[in-house]
Image: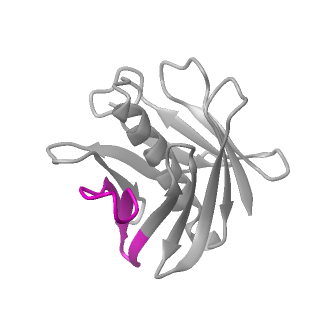
């Protein structure tokens, strides 16, 4: 299934919608206005919360936690030695996910043990950050969309932007 993450150009609360391949609102991400924890919540189309995205503080390199409603967590973190491998790694209850590709051009893939589970492409000519995401593992749709949101936050924080912090 394909999704389109369209982040608003100007938003104090860091809230935006995620559309499916037919242009229907499939998910909604809502952030807290002036929140110290800079957390976001991912809701389904029925406005039910699915997971929370939280910045992990007191780490050597930037990291975020994705906390599911069942209490399980996914940890997205930057690698220290990114020259030889992917720049980001995701620790899940189901094993480790690797992210490879061109992060400067926002064209990358998420793989588990070499198997492609998602591909991400940023649209360059739009007024806001817009990502096309193709998910090949539908049972992890919400979590994989959250991973893309986290990577965008961490990439913006690299450029000394207050968006991800």
Q: Is residue 128 left or right of residue 37?
A: right
Screen quadrant of the C terminus:
top left
Q: Is residue 78 left or right of residue 155?
A: left
Q: In the rendered structure, which segment of residues is drawn in magenta?
A: 73-97
In the rendered image, the vertical position of residue 5 relative to residue 140, given as above or below: above
Q: Is residue 66 left or right of residue 129?
A: left
| Magenta-drawn stretch contains 91 | yes
Visible residue check, residue 50: no
Q: Is residue 26 left or right of residue 159?
A: right
In the rendered image, the vertical position of residue 20 relative to residue 15, given as above or below: below
For the point 43% across and 70% down, the residue is: 97
Residue nearest the observer in this picture, 44 or 121:
121
In the rendered image, the vertical position of residue 66 relative to residue 39, given as above or below: below
Image x and y of residue 64, in percent: 33, 49
Visible residue check, residue 54: yes
Image x and y of residue 111, in percent: 51, 72
For the point 27% across and 27% down, the residue is: 36
In the rendered image, the vertical position of residue 133 relative to residue 9, given as above or below: below
Residue nearest the observer in this picture, 90 or 38:
90
For the point 36% across and 33% down, the residue is: 157
For the point 59% across and 72% down, the residue is: 117
Q: Quadrant of residue 88?
A: bottom left
Screen quadrant of the N terminus:
bottom right
| Magenta-drawn stretch contains 61 | no
Image x and y of residue 70, in percent: 40, 66
């Amino acid at each position: 299934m394909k999704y389109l993450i369209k982040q608003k150009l100007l938003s104090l609360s860091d809230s935006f919608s995620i559309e499916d391949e037919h242009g229907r609102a499939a998910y909604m991400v809502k952030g807290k206005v002036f929140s110290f924890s800079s957390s976001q919540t991912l809701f389904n189309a029925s406005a039910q919360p699915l997971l929370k995205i939280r910045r992990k503080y007191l780490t050597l390199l930037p990291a975020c936690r994705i906390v599911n409603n069942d209490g399980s967590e996914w940890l997205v973190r930057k690698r220290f030695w990114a020259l030889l491998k992917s720049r980001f790694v995701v620790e899940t209850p189901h094993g480790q996910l690797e992210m490879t590709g061109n992060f400067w051009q926002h064209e990358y893939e998420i793989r588990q043990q070499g198997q492609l589970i998602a591909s991400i492409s940023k649209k360059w000519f739009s007024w806001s950050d817009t990502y096309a995401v193709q998910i090949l593992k539908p049972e992890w749709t919400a979590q994989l969309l959250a991973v893309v949101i986290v990577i965008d936050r961490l990439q913006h924080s690299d450029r000394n932007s207050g968006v991800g912090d």
